[in-house]
Image (cartoon, coloured by chain):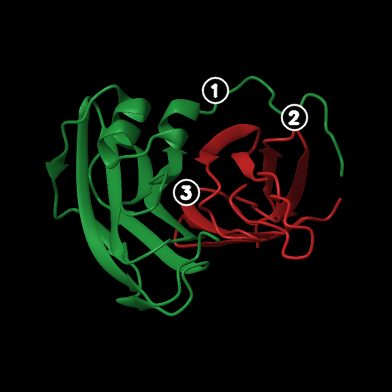
Chain colours: A red, B green
Amino acid sequence: MASIKMRAKTAEGVTTIKALISHPMDTGLMKNKKTGKVIPAHFIQEVVCEHNGKAVMTAHWGPAISKNPYLSFRFKGGNAGDTVKLSWVDNKGESDSSETTIS
Amino acid sequence: MAISAGLLTPRMVLAAWPKGAFEAKTVDEAVNGLFGSTTLTGSDQIKIKAPDIAENGAVVPISVTTDIADAQSISVIAEKNSTPLAASFALGAGAEGFVSTRIKMGKTGSVIAVVKSGDKLYSTGKEVKVTIGGCGG
């Protein structure tokens, strides 16, 4: 699945990750305008970023994170050529992950 | 949608999703749900970058930077949302005190960032005016 677009760049000893995830992040508060039925909550709850097999960032999200979430964070270290992996799990138990190489 | 078994391999302790905190209806309850405490110390070592006026409450870009030593987590709270807690980021070894994302804001109010370091909770807030609310309805 290709829900994650990610860039990992290192400069002066710090690696910056920027990711864009395709996900509806439905709050469960909206109604389908045609049917009048509530659109059930469907949002990412956990995001984990690993570098060389170690988690550098773990996030817990609620439905207030915008649709198609954007995320950026930084960590010390990381050399060009290293692998960074980003994974997410949502409230329905669906998940996806993606790896990228630090440039 | 891909379901990856073994996605959450054991490494950093991944606490269960803090349901109580995310369903809390007040800032105090959300902070208490996350940390078991409501004692927040104001800090000027936390900077929130957010628009003064958000045209679209469904997508409000927020960045939080902190140089508080040994920051373990950064949490983002939208004070006036029906459930204020938007996100909590746990910083692993080597992670810098910086997160950037986009949140929904139902109406004008403060975005509050809480940084945990050791046993203390530090916070700061920034008022964001919302012209069109972003939580639905």
Q: Is residue A100 above or below residue A42?
A: below
Q: Chain of mark 1?
A: B
Circle 2 sits in a helix, a strand or a loop, which is it?
Answer: loop
- The amino acid on which the numbered mark 2 sits, given as a three-letter code, is Leu
Residue at left offset 69%, top offset 49%? A38
Quadrant in which residue A91 is drawn = top right
Please give the residue where the numbered disc 2 appears in the rendered image: B7
Distance from label 3 to label 1 (Cα)?
Answer: 24 Å
The residue depicted at 82 percent of the width and 26 percent of the height is B5
User: Which residue is nearer to you in this view: B21 or B87?
Assistant: B21
Residue at image position (18%, 53%) is B45
Q: Could you give the CA–CA distance between mark 1 and mark 2, rounded to whole angstroms? A: 14 Å
Amino acid carrying mark 3 in the image: Phe
Q: Nearer the viewer, mark 3 or mark 1?
A: 1
Give the amino acid type for the residue marked by disc 1 in the picture: Ala
Element type where label 1 sits in the image: loop
Gap in Å between the C-alphas at discs 3 and 2? Answer: 22 Å
**Are the residues under marks 1 and 2 on the same chain?**
yes
Is A1 situated left or right of B131 in this image?
right
Instruction: Tell me the residue that label 1 is attached to.
Output: B16
Name the residue rendered at 47%, 49% in the picture: A75
Q: Residues within 10 Å of mark 2 (few under 14, many from 20)?
A: some
Q: Residue under label 3, please give it.
A: A75
Dot 1 crowding, Cα within 10 Å, few <14, some 14–19, many 20+:
few
Residue B104, percent from left and from top:
48, 60
**Same chain assignment for discs 3 and 2:** no
